Image: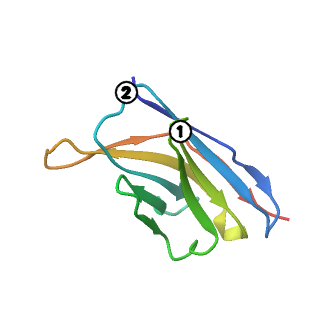
Amino acid sequence: QVQLVESGGGLVQPGGSLRLSCTASGSIFQIVARGWYRQSPGKERESVAVITSGGSTNYADSVKGRFIILRDYAENTLYLQMNGLKPEDTAVYYCNYRTYSGAYYPSDYWGQGTQVTVSS
């Protein structure tokens, strides 16, 4: 029943900005973190930006100072504001919700991904 849907990807020139959105539907409980991940061809999926339920944030070194992760509490939407985009930011970006109910491992929910291409 839980579904995460990303949107906002597209083609942007180097130095430009883009805002990704992730809308959650269904009932999601015991959320401990929300985040954005990305994957480029030939590379493993990597963490880009994560925000915990306590409000702390963590960013990949490659995006620090350029990307910001945000939450809209009223709309239950997660955003990734991307500024100063570089060609190396080109990837499929995925939304992630992590829940934990006290078991050995948490559970992860993923969106389908949205393509971001940075090129002139």
Q: Is residue 116 left or right of residue 22?
A: right
Q: Which mark is residue 27?
A: 2
Q: Point out residue 74 in the picture as x, y percentages from the top left corner.
A: 53, 36
Q: Point out residue 27 in the picture as x, y percentages from the top left corner.
A: 37, 27
Q: Point out residue 5 in the picture as x, y percentages from the top left corner.
A: 55, 35
Q: Which mark is residue 112?
A: 1
Q: Which mark is residue 22?
A: none
Q: Quadrant of the C terminus?
A: bottom right
Q: From where the camera sits, is residue 44 visible? A: no
* N-term mark: 2 or 1: 2
Q: Point out residue 19 in the picture as x, y percentages from the top left corner.
A: 68, 52
Q: Write the residue at 61% across / 44% down.
A: 21
Element marked by disc 2: loop
Q: Is residue 53 left or right of residue 78?
A: left
Label 1: how many Cα within 10 Å (few below 14, some 14–19, many 20+): some
Quarter of the rendering containing residue 18: bottom right
Q: Residue furthest top?
A: 1
In depth, the one of 35 and 37 nearer the eye is 35
